[in-house]
Image (cartoon, grey):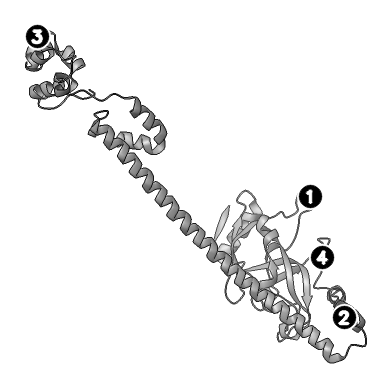
Amino acid sequence: MLKTTKRYVITTNAVNAYGFRVLTKGIDWSLYDGNPIMLYMHFRATGQNENEVKALGNVREIETDENGVVTGRLYFNDKYPFAVQMYDGYENGTYNMLSIGVHPVELSDAPELLLPGQTYPTVSKSIAKEISCVDIGANPEALGVALYDASGKIITLSDQGEKDHFFHNQISQMKILTLSAPAILTLLKLSDTTPEAEVFEKIKTLVTLADDQAAKIVTLSADKATAEGKVLELTKKLDDQVALVLSDKIDSLLNQAVADRKITADELPSWKELATVNLAHVEKVIGLKAGAVTVSQHLNTPSSNDKLIKLCEKTYDQLFAAGELEYVKLNDVEAYKTIYKNKFGSEPKNV
C-alpha cells in the first residue's frame, strides 16, 4: 500500500454546497472501521465491466479534533495502476479533497442546529459507509458529502427535486410521542375528576423520585467501588500474611534440619526453594533423613571401635595408602571432611 505523506480532511460540521450539514459527533464509524474502503467519486464497481473503476484503497488513522474536523491518511493499492496514479495526484498536489458517504439515520430541523446559509435540515446522526477521492469538494472547506438511502442507493443531491423529496420524507417520518390527558391520568392512577394541582403534584413527586433514585444509583456505585477496593486491599494483606507465616515455617524446619545434621548450611537455598513450592513434600523427605554422626557420637556409642578411632588420627595420605579412606568416609563423614580439608585446604563437595 502507498501511504500519503499528508493527512486530508474528510468531513467537518460546516454547511456543504447542497445546503445541509452532517454533524461530526453524530457519525457512527463502527461499520467503516471494519471495512475502511476508499472509492473514486463515490463509484462502486458492479463487476459487469472490467474497465470499471475499482476501489482505490483505504482511509486509516482517522482522527477528530476539538472543532469537529475529521482527518485521515490515505492508503492506495500499489497493485492497481489507477490507484497509483491517484496516489501521485495527491502527493503532487493535483488532488486535495475527499468526500464522505453516509447513510442518514436522524435528521433535525432544530433551530439551534442551523447555521447561516443552511437551507435543509441537519443530519444529526448517520453511519459512515465509504470515503471517496474527488476532484471538486462540496463545501467551502473543500469537502464533499454523499448520502445513501436504506437500500444502499446513492441519492442524487445535484437533482433539486430528488433532494427536496428526500429531506421532506425524512422529516415527515419523524414521529413525536404524545399522550392525551386521560392517558396521563391513567398512568398516574388518577381519575378524570382529580384537581389539576393534585395532578401536577403527583408528576412532581414522580420526577423527584426519579432524581432520588438516580442519586442513589450514583452513591451505590461509589460505595461498590470503595468496597471492592477494600476487598482487594484486605486480600493482599491476607496473602502477605500467609506468605510470611509460610516463610517462617520453612525457615524453622530447615534450620532444625541443619542443627540435626540432616542437611548442610550450603544446601539451605535449594531446600528453601523446594519447600516454597511443596512444603509437605520437603517435610516428609527431611523427616525420613538421618542426621550425620559426629566423631564424638561415634566415640560415645557402643558401636564405636578402636579401629575407627585410630584411623581418624591418620593423615589423608596414610589412609589412602592403607586403603581405609572409604571406611572412614562411610563411618564418620565429618572426620573424613576434616582429613580431606587438612590435605587439600577445603572440604570435599557432594559428600
* Residue bearing the label numbered 3: 321
Mark closer to the observer (1, 3): 3
Marks 2, 4: nearer the viewer:
2
- Horizontal side of 39 relative to 64 (left or right) equals right
**Earlier residue among tags 3 and 2:** 2
CA gap, disc 2 and disc 4: 37 Å
Between marks 3 and 4, how big is the CA–CA gap? 106 Å
Is residue 193 among what the camera can see?
A: yes
| Comes first in the chain, label 2 or label 4 | 4
- Residue at 56% of width from left, 57% of height from top? 3
Question: Mark 1 and mark 2: span between their CA atoms?
Answer: 57 Å
Tell me if mark 4 has few (under 14), some (14-19) or many (20+) residues whose alpha carbon lies within 10 angstroms of its own: few
Q: Amino acid at mark 3?
A: Ala
- Residue 110 locus on image (x, y percent): 76, 83
Q: Earlier in the sequence, mark 1 or mark 3?
A: 1
Q: Secondary structure at mark 3?
A: helix
Asked which secondary structure carries label 1, the reply is loop
**Label 3 neighbour load within 10 Å: few <14, some 14-19, many 20+:** few
Q: Nearer the viewer, mark 1 or mark 4?
A: 4
Residue type beneath disc 4: Asp
Q: Do labels 1 and 4 touch, CB within 8 Å?
A: no
Closer to the chain start, of discs 3 and 4, is 4
Which amino acid type is marked by label 2? Ile
Q: Which residue is mark 4?
A: 149
Residue under the point 17% across and 22% down: 297
N-term mark: 1 or 4: 1
Instruction: Tell me if residue 216 comes above or below residue 263 in the rendering.
Output: below
**Above or below, comparing residue 129 to residue 298 in the picture:** below
Where residue 119 appears, as percent x and y from the top left, is 78, 83
Residue carrying label 1: 47
Q: Nearer the viewer, residue 147 or 17?
A: 147
Q: Which residue is mark 2?
A: 184
